[in-house]
């Protein structure tokens, strides 16, 4: 794993680009080590002139320019390689999070859609400056100061001692500042996620907020929360500037002490510090040229120290997202050929994690069954198990004569029509929301769901764009559109969760009639309901939780 990778949370993904990152860090070190060679040429030319000689300027200038070009090429190659590796790591992380969220059935402890979106879209980009600036700077710190210190001690033990004493103080203070910087960055990242979650929640409830006249209160809450985020951001910036100030102070003191020693030595005022002879002009100039670059890697490290703090905070968030234990959708969510076999389903000895034992039941092909019981009796859980949206922690679900598993869940769901209790839509046209990429008769589905008049009344008919909450549709209209979506491709099994809840009598009757038509064409029909009128039109009623 490359030096500087925060913890083990990104270790696996970083390992994929470890070779490229090590290559980039190596090029960065090589580019930095060219300066001592350039400094030697400059010191040779100036020292020769000060001693009364004539330096071969064409050779010196040509060598200096050639080394400068080589240094620029190496630096550019290092930056490009690090940038490529960083972008690939971030892209892999985004793919992992999006793929994981695609199969997540409900928000977990990490946060809702806003927090996940903030992590995926905004926060992961924080890793790029860490990988492209901090990691190469850390590699340079591990090599360049040691080389310069060795060269300085070779020429003057006094100047080397100055560098040796002042250099280690900088990392010590940076580490102390870095502990506080990580905590501040973590608080800032958490607040960004919380604020995004709050925004998503308020946008989804925008109509209710306006009806209740709570717009002012909500706006004030956003002002307060955004003010808190601004303060947390400024705290991170203050710590970043503090670390840079500490480094510049010690670097300036170190360079000044070396310059004073070299100056007085060349003037003949100091006769110690060199190895057995006075410090020569060439050696003194060489030491003066090397001294600033002894601290330069530390300067670069300090300038990017807040990048590491932010990367650590993001790495912790990625770890928390990975550890978030929530139910995942069985299967891959892929479009596959339907599972062969009868359109039947049975449950035996099923129990969800931490839940009570669910009743055993068997529903035959072509049967219409109502699940009736009080709220919390397990109706929705049973429907989700039948639909292959969840798998039990204990027991067995049998569909089409086969045990339902993650391997055949996609094929089983290809035969289903699912009508959830809450209507959800994609931010696209009404027609696309009903089709969902499947072939079928959209006019027939709308007719069966008694929703033709609803579609025709929309501003642009079937091409009207809906929001996630079905903008432009009332609750009853949205319910009928979900029924049209469920029956659009003439599924073998229709599962409906509280299809008539909170609907007026006329709308409930229209939805019920649409469901009965599915039963009449031979589909297996299972509804979870409190509506005894709907339940009475089924072939069989299964009572749960002491109902009946």
Image (spheres, rainbow, N blue to C red):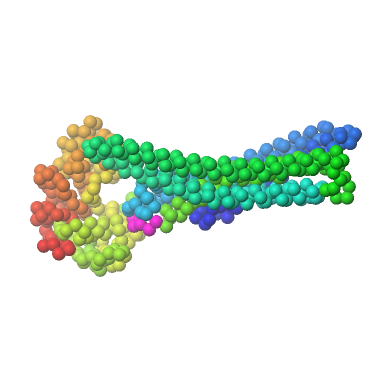
Q: Residue at x 19, y 42 (%)?
A: 475
Image-quadrant location for residue 376: bottom left
Judge from the rendering whether residue 354 lies leftward or rightward of residue 441; answer left or right. right
What quarter of the picture does the C terminus occupy?
bottom left
Judge from the rendering whether residue 117 lies leftward or rightward of residue 279; answer left or right. left
Region of the chain picked out in magenta, as a range: 324-332
Judged from this view, the residue extending furthest toward the right is: 52
What quarter of the picture does the N terminus occupy?
bottom right
The reply to whether residue 165 is visible in this rendering is yes
Front-most of residues 178 and 297: 178
Image-quadrant location for residue 55: top right
Residue 172 spot, x, y in % from top left: 63, 52
Q: Residue at x 37, y 50 (%)?
A: 111
In reply to whether residue 327 is colored magenta, the answer given is yes
Most common secondary structure along the magenta stretch: loop
Residue 385 spot, x, y in % from top left: 26, 59
Q: Residue at x 42, y 57 (%)?
A: 323
Judged from this view, the residue extending furthest toward the front is: 269
The reply to whether residue 488 is visible in this rendering is no
Residue 535 spot, x, y in % from top left: 12, 55
């Amino acid at each position: 794993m490359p030096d500087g990778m925060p913890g083990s949370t990104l270790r696996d993904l970083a390992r994929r680009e470890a070779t490229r990152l090590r290559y980039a860090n190596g090029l960065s070190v090589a580019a930095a080590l060219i300066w001592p060679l350039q400094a030697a040429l400059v010191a040779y030319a100036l020292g020769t002139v000060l001693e009364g000689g004539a330096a071969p300027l064409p050779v010196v200038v040509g060598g200096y320019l050639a080394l400068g070009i080589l240094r620029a090429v190496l630096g550019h190659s290092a930056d490009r390689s690090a940038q490529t590796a960083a972008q690939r790591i971030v892209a892999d992380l985004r793919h992992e999070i999006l793929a994981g969220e695609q199969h997540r059935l409900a928000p977990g402890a990490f946060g809702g859609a806003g927090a996940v979106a903030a992590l995926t879209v905004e926060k992961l980009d924080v890793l790029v400056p860490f990988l492209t600036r901090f990691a190469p700077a850390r590699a340079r710190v591990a090599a360049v100061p040691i080389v310069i210190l060795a060269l300085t001690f070779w020429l003057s033990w006094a100047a080397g001692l100055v560098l040796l004493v002042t250099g280690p103080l900088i990392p010590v203070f940076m580490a102390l500042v870095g502990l506080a910087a990580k905590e501040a960055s973590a608080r800032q990242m958490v607040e960004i996620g919380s604020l995004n979650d709050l925004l998503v929640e308020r946008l989804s409830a925008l109509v209710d907020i306006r009806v209740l006249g709570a717009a002012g209160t909500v706006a004030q809450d956003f002002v307060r929360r955004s003010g808190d985020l601004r303060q947390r951001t400024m705290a991170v910036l203050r710590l970043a500037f503090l670390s840079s100030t500490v480094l510049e102070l010690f670097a300036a003191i170190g360079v000044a002490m070396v310059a004073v020693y070299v100056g007085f030595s060349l003037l003949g005022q100091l006769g110690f510090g060199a190895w057995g002879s006075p410090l020569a002009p060439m050696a003194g100039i060489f030491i003066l040229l090397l001294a600033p670059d002894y601290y330069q890697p530390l300067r670069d490290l300090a300038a990017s120290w807040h990048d590491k703090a932010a990367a650590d905070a993001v790495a912790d968030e990625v770890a928390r997202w990975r550890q978030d234990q929530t139910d995942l959708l069985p299967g891959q969510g892929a479009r596959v050929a339907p599972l062969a076999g009868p359109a039947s389903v049975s449950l035996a000895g099923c129990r969800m994690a931490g839940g009570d034992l669910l009743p055993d039941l068997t529903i035959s092909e072509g049967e219409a069954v109502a699940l009736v019981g009080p709220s919390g009796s397990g109706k929705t859980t049973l429907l989700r198990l039948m639909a292959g949206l969840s798998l039990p922690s204990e027991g067995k679900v049998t569909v089409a004569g086969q045990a339902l598993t993650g391997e055949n869940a996609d094929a089983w769901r290809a035969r289903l029509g699912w009508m959830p209790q809450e209507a959800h839509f994609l931010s696209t046209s009404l027609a696309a929301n009903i089709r969902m990429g499947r072939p079928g008769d959209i006019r027939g589905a709308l007719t069966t769901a008694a929703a033709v008049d609803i579609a025709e009344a929309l501003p642009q008919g079937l091409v009207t764009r809906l929001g996630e909450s079905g903008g432009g549709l009332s609750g009853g209209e949205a319910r009928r559109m979900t029924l049209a979506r469920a029956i659009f491709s003439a599924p073998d099994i229709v599962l409906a969760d509280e299809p008539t809840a909170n609907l007026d009598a006329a709308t409930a009757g229209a939805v019920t009639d649409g469901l009965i038509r599915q039963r009449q064409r031979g589909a297996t029909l299972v509804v979870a309901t409190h509506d005894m009128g709907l339940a009475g039109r089924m072939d069989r009623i299964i009572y749960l939780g002491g109902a009946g």
